[in-house]
Image: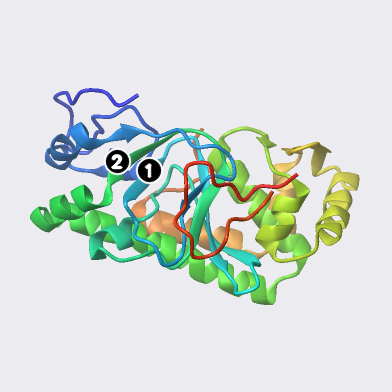
């Protein structure tokens, strides 16, 4: 729930949220933006942005986890960024009043707070402190996207799968990650049968337990040992740029190029 602003410290949030961006804003920026913040629950597979269309809203996840993917001409996708409570999506497009170049959708459903992109842009034009803050968070997202490109090109499937599960596990705050095998295959850019075999091997080794639509992380320490350097690299860049470490804290695809509708989903069993 979005709460009324109260007298708090200079870096304390005046809204009830886990989101690092909102919690890092100066109180005067929060006072200016708070009347326009909206609770916006999202469900798994819900599309927020499509390539080529304007970004009308900026989303600040609290318990939801969002994915940014590149859409190819044949409809295939590959993930470049995973965003949870440590950041936000749509910031750079909002600041530049530009269209999205990627598809962004809900990886794991939950709560977000959204703000009109134009409202955020107007406030940032008035506040140098807010501009600096937003650019730092956008830079952290970009650093993660760059690392994902390198990871997809250079590391084997088991390493990439462990990295992806660890990142999702960090942001949900629980040992259950609600994901289908088809979804994982789409995000990793491989066939479902390939992901099925890789998950079976992790389960046989005692790292995870599978059930329909969910994966339970049983041995996080061993999973971290199995993953590639990219997992720690992303955590380090987040810590360096914004002082946030997400591990500490607690289908049918739509037609590419079409403006996302409230009922749009990319999830498939």
Instruction: Tell me how far mark 2 sits from mark 1, CA to CA.
Output: 8 Å
Q: Is residue 248 left or right of residue 4?
A: right
Front tag of 2 and 1: 1
**Whole-percent x, y for residue 221 in the image:** 70, 46
Please identify the quarter of the rendering in which residue 180 is found. Answer: top right
List the residue tagged with mark 1: 60
Question: Along the polypeptide, which appears first: circle 2 or circle 1?
Answer: 2
Q: Is residue 6 above or below residue 129?
A: above
**Whole-percent x, y for residue 91 in the image:** 32, 56
**Whole-percent x, y for residue 247 in the image:** 54, 44
Q: Are marks 2 and 1 in contact (CB under 8 Å)?
A: yes
Q: Quick one: SS at disc 1? A: strand
Mark 2 burial class by Cα count in 10 Å: few <14, some 14-19, many 20+: many
Tag shown at residue 231: none
Q: Is residue 3 above or below residue 48?
A: above
Q: Quadrant of the C terminus?
A: top right
List the residue tagged with mark 2: 22
Q: Quadrant of the N terminus?
A: top left
- Residue at image position (22%, 38%) is 11
Q: Quick one: SS at disc 2? A: helix
Q: Is residue 39 left or right of residue 4?
A: right
Viewer-nearest residue: 187 or 131:
187
**Whole-percent x, y for residue 90 in the image:** 36, 55
Please identify the quarter of the rendering in which residue 16 is found. Answer: top left
- Residue at image position (67%, 52%) is 252
- Residue at image position (60%, 74%) is 73
Res 174 visible: yes
Q: Is residue 98 left or right of residue 259?
A: left
- Residue at image position (11%, 53%) is 127
Res 136 visible: no
Q: Is residue 269 left or right of residue 8?
A: right
Q: Is residue 114 above or below residue 88?
A: above
């Amino acid at each position: 729930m979005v709460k009324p602003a109260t007298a708090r410290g200079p870096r304390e949030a005046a809204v009830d949220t886990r989101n690092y961006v909102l919690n890092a804003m100066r109180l005067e920026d929060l006072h200016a933006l708070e009347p326009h913040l909206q609770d916006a629950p999202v469900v798994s597979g819900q599309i927020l942005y499509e390539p080529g269309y304007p970004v009308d809203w900026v989303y600040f996840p609290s318990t939801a986890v969002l994915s940014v993917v590149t859409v190819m001409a044949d409809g295939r996708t590959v993930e470049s960024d995973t965003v949870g409570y440590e950041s936000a999506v749509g910031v750079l497009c909002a600041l530049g009043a530009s269209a999205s170049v990627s598809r962004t959708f809900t990886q794991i459903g939950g709560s977000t707070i959204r703000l009109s992109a134009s409202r955020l842009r107007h406030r940032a034009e008035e506040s140098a402190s807010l501009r600096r803050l937003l650019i730092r968070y956008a830079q952290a997202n970009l650093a993660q996207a760059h690392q994902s490109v390198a990871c997809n090109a250079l590391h084997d499937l088991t390493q990439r799968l462990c990295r992806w599960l660890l990142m999702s596990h960090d942001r949900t705050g629980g040992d259950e990650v609600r994901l289908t095998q088809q979804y994982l295959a789409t995000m990793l850019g491989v066939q479902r049968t390939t992901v099925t075999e890789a998950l079976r091997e992790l389960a046989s080794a005692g790292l995870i337990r599978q059930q329909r639509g969910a994966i339970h992380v049983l041995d996080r320490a061993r999973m971290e040992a199995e993953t590639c350097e990219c997992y720690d690299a992303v955590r380090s860049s987040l810590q360096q740029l914004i002082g946030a470490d997400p591990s500490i804290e607690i289908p049918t695809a739509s037609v590419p190029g079409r403006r996302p509708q409230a009922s749009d989903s990319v999830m498939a069993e």
